[in-house]
Amino acid sequence: MKQIFLIVILGLSFQSGLSQKIIENDFQTYFDKYGVEGCFVLFNQLDDELIKYNSNLCDSGYIPASTFKIPHSLIAIEEKAIKDTTEVIKWDGHEWPHKTWNQDQTLKTAMRYSCIWVYFSFAEQIGIDKYYKYVNEFNYGNKDLTGPPTRFWLAGLFKISANEQVDFLKRFYNYDLPVSRNSIDIVKDLIVLEQNDFYTLSGKTGSGRLTDNEYIMWLVGYVERNNQPYFYAMNFKTDNLEKTQQARYEITKDILKELKLIE
């Protein structure tokens, strides 16, 4: 049985008025399986409890890549860059490396396939000044959008840590963002990954280039079980983008299974 270190941090909890618990857990086996180093953080809202692995890395900021599609979709809906999940976004015929991108899209398929050109088109319509407004209001990452104005979430100085991902997801899930409840409900529906009688797993992957031969890989989201949310963020670095795509799901799901949040 893995050794668990329990650290009690003194200070007021926002939820209960009691000291927040931070549990350092050893999930290294799941990362070692793919030969990568990364971190994991999970927040149990009911018990005001944080579970972390490699907590020193949980504060490290990286490009959000496609995890930004969660706030990005909210912004697109709020700014009326798209009407709803049924509106068709016409493909212009440009051939992309992923077959699923080379067709007309809806907001639902753009999220499911992580279709990059749909979000480029949103950025062109919305403009960088509006993004600055929203990321500041969302308190999202380091709020530095220096970089290509229509793809700043993929290249540039924009950074977010695993801890900050969880903080944003808490505000998103609890309707604590300056956007309409309807916009949040639409995006919540878009990011459901698995759903059954016992739990709902929601999330979004991302992968971003750090150097010529190094990438950051993300999976962030939340699990709903017994009517309670558990917010998580996982990332790792890799020099092999293709071989570690599925590892984002496998590592995260193995950890969530150990924590008995999913089967």
Image: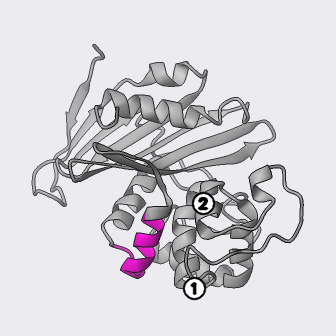
Disc 1 element: loop
Residue holding disc 1: 79
Tag 2: residue type? Met
- Which is more toward the observer, 212 or 183? 183
Task: Let me know if residue 147 appears in the view.
Answer: no
Q: Quadrant of the N terminus?
A: top left
Q: Is residue 88 left or right of residue 138?
A: right
Q: Residue at x 74, y 53 (%)?
A: 100
Which callout, 1 or 2, points to the residue nearer the camera? 2
Q: Which residues are magenta?
A: 176-188
Q: Residue furthest top?
A: 1
Dot 1 or dot 2, earlier in sequence: 1
Identify the image quadrant of residue 188: bottom left
Q: Residue furthest right?
A: 94
Secondary structure that dominates the magenta span: helix
Q: Quadrant of the C terminus?
A: top left
Q: Check residue 128 for magenta coloring.
A: no
